[in-house]
Image (cartoon, rainbow, N blue to C red):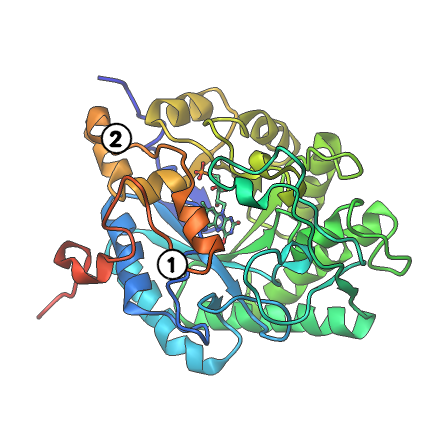
Amino acid sequence: MASLEKLFEPIKINKLEVNNRICYAPTGKSHCTEDGHVSDQAICYYVARAKGGTGLIIVEAALPIAKYARFGRLLGCWDDSQLAGLRNLAEAIHAAGARVVVQETLGFGSQAMFPVGGEVVGPSDVPSRIGKGTAPRGLGFMDGAVGVPPRPLTKEEIIELEDSFAGGAERIMKAGFDGLEVHGCHGYLIAGFLSPYSNKRQDEYGGSFENRLRLAKNLLKKTRDKVGPDFVIGFRMSGDEHLEGGYNIEEGQKIAKELEEAGANYIHISSGRYEVWNRMLPDEEGTMLDDAKAIKQAVSIPVICPNIHDPRTGERAIKEGMTDMIALSRGLIADPAWANKAKAGKLDEIRRCVLCNTCLKTLFTGFSIRCAVNPEVGWERFIPEYYPPIKRK
Ligand SMILES: Cc1cc2nc3c(=O)[nH]c(=O)nc-3n(C[C@H](O)[C@H](O)[C@H](O)COP(=O)(O)O)c2cc1C
């Protein structure tokens, strides 16, 4: 039996103890209501992954402001009416045995390419272009697509976004989550500001390296002021944009270092942006490990690396110091009990993701996600095994 002791070693993030190194990577599923409220389906989906032994659940991207382009059924933290559902979600995941943070986003920015309503805004008017030949497997119908040029945000609008982010963070904390993760990857709005490819501004939010980081650092500062020192604040960034005109891994290391100094408690890497889409959703596992290793060399806070599908790859990566934790999106869609099966040494029983991207294809065509190998996806609310554990006195 393969020894997987590193994968099941506990880890501390800020003050939070997580009992293993396995994270559920944030994954939009279109399981929420049209106005951003948590649904029973969303709760049962996450409970299944928590009961399955995942140490840290990173809940899909939640929006703190509903003003700009978004698609329906995206999670919201922009209104107090959303608090009750968020609280139910936090309680249910905790009761099922996992720690939980929520990924918070300022929206798609130029990457608003799929069915969205609302105005497309960004740092500058550079539209997204899905590079020819880079659409991941199953998503060829989007190859070469060009997005709407975003309207550049005014300084006042950027400050409003920063304040709304901190307000959303306060709701996430009030609801009982252990922390939040800033969505700063994939060329979405926050990442759009970090990148020289999409940020052509001439004011204090663009131009120099320091100015491109201003939005991210202000978000960390304003959020920390609201949530206090103990709440976990992670930051997800593309380690390397792998795009001409974007930032490379050396600049990625500098960004990560700055984010650590600005108060981030962990760095969760991803790779690329829609312009090089298969970097974000690779057709094979382990492709982000070199970037993770480079980022890990630049910071002293924990690093999380996604795109791990085989537990032995995760174990090796942690053992060799390439990452501190691993994250799975598609692997945990395919099998919610991935972690428990790995722990029990039942690697052959893991229902492996076949990297067909049916999940993303269903999402991008306006539906909630489905999975080619796991017929339970989308129906967890009807499966008693996945109900939240209720302790009756
Ligand atoms: C259906 C779907 C939705 C996703 N939604 C998000 C999201 O909300 N936020 C995010 O940062 N990444 C998102 N991702 C990217 C994943 O978190 C992950 O980085 C990527 O799928 C590669 O890891 P994997 O090989 O484990 O799937 C999504 C991926 C998929 C397949």
- The front one of 44 and 159 is 44
**Secondary structure category for the residue under label 1:** loop
Count residues near mark 2 (Cα–Cα under 10 Å), then give few for <14, some for 14-19, many for 20+: many
**Circle 1: residue type:** Ser
- Residue 259 is left or right of residue 95, and the answer is right
Residue at image coords 27%, 18%:
2
Work out whether mark 1 precedes mark 2 in sequence or the reverse, and give the earlier one: 2
Measure how far apart labels 1 and 2 are at the Cα level.
28 Å
Amino acid type, label 2: Ala
Circle 2 residue? 342
- Residue 345: x and y in percent read 21, 25
Tell me residue 260's x, y (percent).
64, 46
Tag 2's secondary structure? helix
Dividing the image into 4 quarters, which one contains the N terminus? Answer: top left
Mark 1 residue's CB less than 8 Å from ligand 1: no
Q: Which residue is mark 1?
A: 368
